[in-house]
Image (tube, helix red, strand yellow):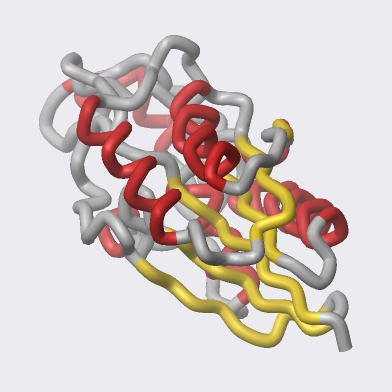
Amino acid sequence: MTRTAVHLVRHGEVENPAGVLYGRMPGFVLSELGKRQALIVAEHLAANDIAHVVASPLERAQQTAAPITDSHRLTMDTDEQLIEADNVFEGQRVSVGDGALRSVRRWPQLRNPFLPSWGEPYMQIARRMLAAVYRARGHAEGHEAVCVSHQLPIWTLRRFLEGRRLWHDPRRRQCSLASVTSLLFEGERLVAIRYTEPAGASSPKVTGA
């Protein structure tokens, strides 16, 4: 049975001095720390049998993928299905006690946290991410692939694959900056999920991450 690994890499820290929820907005790039984190995760994967690298179209994901691509002398692909989740609060501050969440007119968008009502449905995220993973697995069959994406899509897919409910407390996500969530396949069958933090742990509560 052919064994293949697909590594879901979260991008590094983003430059975000205003502390907004940047979502899919263009122009949000890696901070200096984020660039170092990208190099760390590339070094972590340097000895792996990487045959395919694909990233979300957003700048921070492309920047994180670049050192991995370079170290394995590959060409980076882009997959729209790896993009960050859509969110109606994009471009606004959303910390508890300030910003958009204080506006009464925004409260109807918070009515259903199980969907969620403020953005792209969790099930839709899981399905598009799973499709991207299987495309990457096909490109790298018998070897390893890297998919550079974002915290919520990666965590949502992991919960889906582990058979857990998709709605969750964002503060409890296990998906640190530049972390690696590895999906191990035998043929097309998922047999294991592993998680590592080459650049160390980071808080899911930090705006700009």
Camera sees residue 87 = yes
Farthest residue, direction left = 97
Residue 44 against residue 98 in the figure, above or below:
below
Residue at left 54%, top 24%?
58
Q: Quadrant of the N terminus?
A: bottom right
Using the image, determine if residue 86 lies above or below residue 2.
Answer: above
Q: Is residue 199 left or right of residue 105?
A: left
Q: Residue at x 73, y 55 (%)?
A: 51
Which residue is painted at 55% across and 49% down in the image? 153
Question: Of 138 and 40, which appears nearest the observer?
Answer: 40
Res 93 → quadrant = top left
Q: Residue at x 32, y 61 (%)?
A: 198
Question: Where residue 55 appears, x then y in whole percent?
Answer: 62, 37
x, y percent for residue 43? 40, 54
Decide if residue 167 is on the left or right side of residue 127: left
Q: Is residue 203 left or right of residue 130?
A: left
Q: Relative to 118, is 186 on the left or the right?
A: right
How many marks do you count on the picture?
A: 0
* Image position, residue 176 (x, y; %): 32, 55
Whether residue 209 is visible to the viewer of this picture, yes or no, is no
From the viewer's perspective, is residue 182 above or below residue 115? Answer: below
Please provide percent x and percent y for residue 90. Answer: 42, 20
The quarter of the rendered structure image containing the C terminus is top left
